[in-house]
Image: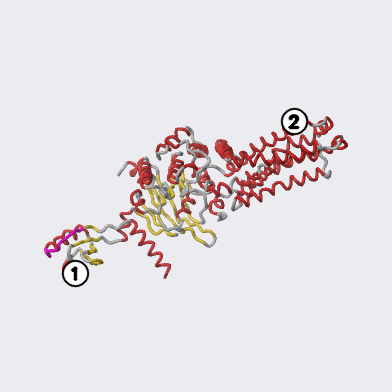
Amino acid sequence: MMGLDATRIRSVVRKELRDYRRKRSIVVAMVILPTIFLIQPTLAIFLASPSSSGDASYYDLPLLLLLLIPVITPSTLAAYSVVGEREQGTLEPLLTTPIRRQEFILGKATAVMIPTLALSYTVFGLFLAVVRLFANPAAVSGVFQQGPVLLALALLTPLLAGWAIVVGMAVSVRASEVRVAQQLGMVASFPPLAVVVLLGVGVIHPTFTSAVLFAIALLVIDVRALRVVSRMFDRERLVTGAKAARS
Amino acid sequence: MTPTKLHAAKSPPALAVTQLSKRFGERTAFSDVSFEVAYGEVFGFLGPNGAGKTTIVRTLGTLIAPTSGAATVAGIPLSPENGVDIRQHISIMPESPGLYLRLTVTENLEYFAGLYGLHQAGTRIKNALAAVNLADRAADLCGGLSKGLRQRVGLARTLLSDPTIMFLDEPTSGLDPVAALEVHNLISGLRQKGVTIFLTTHRLEEAEKLCDRVAILNTTLRTVGRPEDLRRQLFKSALVVKTLVPLSDPDRLFSPIPAVEGWRSEEPGCYELSVSDIRLAAPEVTRGLVNAGADVLSIGEARHSLEDVYLELIDEDVEARKQ
């Protein structure tokens, strides 16, 4: 990744953010999904029976479900990122500039990451604030005693978002049309969903150590996957639909 | 010879292409193409649809890799390692400008100024927009512009980085005659500044007007040269004689003149004479017509357009393929 030009990456990020702001449907879609994912945990906390309120493990699953927000939120944008430009005819002029494929991928990924993190942490903050202010004391202490889960929320949010973005972009680089890319991009949520289910049914126990180890593993996977996507970015395939001949 | 042309004669070429070929599987996009373009030259690239023009532009612009052959672009060898360096020295305007419709004209240009890493982007954007007469539309969303105006924004974008070589793919496509004339003037102005322009066009009169040399491509390169030279190579010199009343015995009149090699008449009172030397033939033919008492309407050199050259070569290909 040597020799990357920060100006070019910043230009891609700035352009993407401008483009998102101008398209209301993108903003609405990004806000709706996290809001939906906020409903179940909130109901679970406020409708808990008195016997459940005292059980600390009862709060694991509602909190862990919040981890799906950074996975679901960026998938549509990431899947659109390359094939969308191709469909609207803006990709070819872009590829004629000196931008390197790594700069393009990093710029696009950062542009998706920024609103994803802003939304995810805002939703977490809102959730915790609502619990703190309006839930019964047993529920408040139950939620705020979930140290490993709260650490996982803080640590894993950018890493899970990174995973979803990288998978979405990988699909986008190879897909022939936006709709297919967006459907396939949802595949990114399967592995995190499986982990949440395993945590929820008690196969994996949330501890500080498991949260940190999972974060480290995810970081390694994200970085490697980003490199793979950069290599998949083939100008010739994107312009002509045919793979570059290696002579 | 202008200073630019003098410079061009001494410099290495801006573009040198040697036996370049590109295949997509079994399909050949272009084959064994060789030509050179001097710095400051406006080089026209003509050919029917599917002839390989856009693929050559994409290849020289490092978007796609050639199957075989070699090229240097702005003095840099064409290779994957040199892609960034080459793209820094060139700009390409594809046939469709590919603008971000939700961004303003200025925002579109700011984006590309950033991708080229340009300093003083604001001044450059202002100058580029002024050059294409769009200064007053700088704050408009591109989605609200007509096709012609979008084309001009695309052209402004190619001007931003002061490229050594500009590849323009059908730059006047979709423009009204006034806007097309403005683009022609812009291209002429760029030539004066020494910018090398590689112009792909279907408008043969545009190529004839703007280009120092043209190449005609039909998968293989059919010919390269100045439009004037191509006409001379393909068509013999000819005189066109028009008379009010058809001549009674044209053969008796034209055949004795040594410079006249043959003649034909496709309509009454109109004769096309093949001549070896127009300067010898014209006075002789005029004298002959006067002596014969013919009512002459006009005598002139037959002008073959670039379109005639183009059609002649492409027709040859069609005939060859039939055989």
- Relative side of A193 to B232, left or right: right
The verdict on residue B296 being magenta is yes
Regarding mark 2 in the picture, which secondary structure is present there? Answer: helix
Front residue (pair A210, B95) = B95
Q: Position of residue A58 (x, y in %)?
A: 83, 38
Front residue (pair B71, B269) = B269
Regarding mark 1 in the picture, which secondary structure is present there? Answer: helix
Same subunit, labels 1 and 2: the answer reads no
Q: Does residue A3 appear in the picture of this structure?
A: no
Q: List the residue tagged with mark 2.
A: A129
Q: List the residue tagged with mark 1.
A: B251
The verdict on residue B279 being magenta is no
* Chain of the residue displaying label 1: B
**Which label sits on residue B31?**
none
Q: Name the residue at 79% across, 45% down.
A: A197
- The answer for how far apart the CA atoms under marks 1 and 2 are is 106 Å
* Chain of the residue displaying label 2: A
Q: Position of residue B286 (x, y in %)?
A: 16, 60
**In this picture, which residue range is highlighted in magenta?**
B291-299
Residue type indicated by callout 2: Ala
Q: Could you say which quadrant of the image residue A133 lies in?
A: top right
Locate the C terminus of chain A by quadrant. Answer: bottom right
- Relative side of B163 to A188, left or right: left
Mark in front: 1 vs 2: 2
Label 1 crowd (10 A; few <14 / some 14-19 / many >=20):
few
Front residue (pair A188, B314) = A188
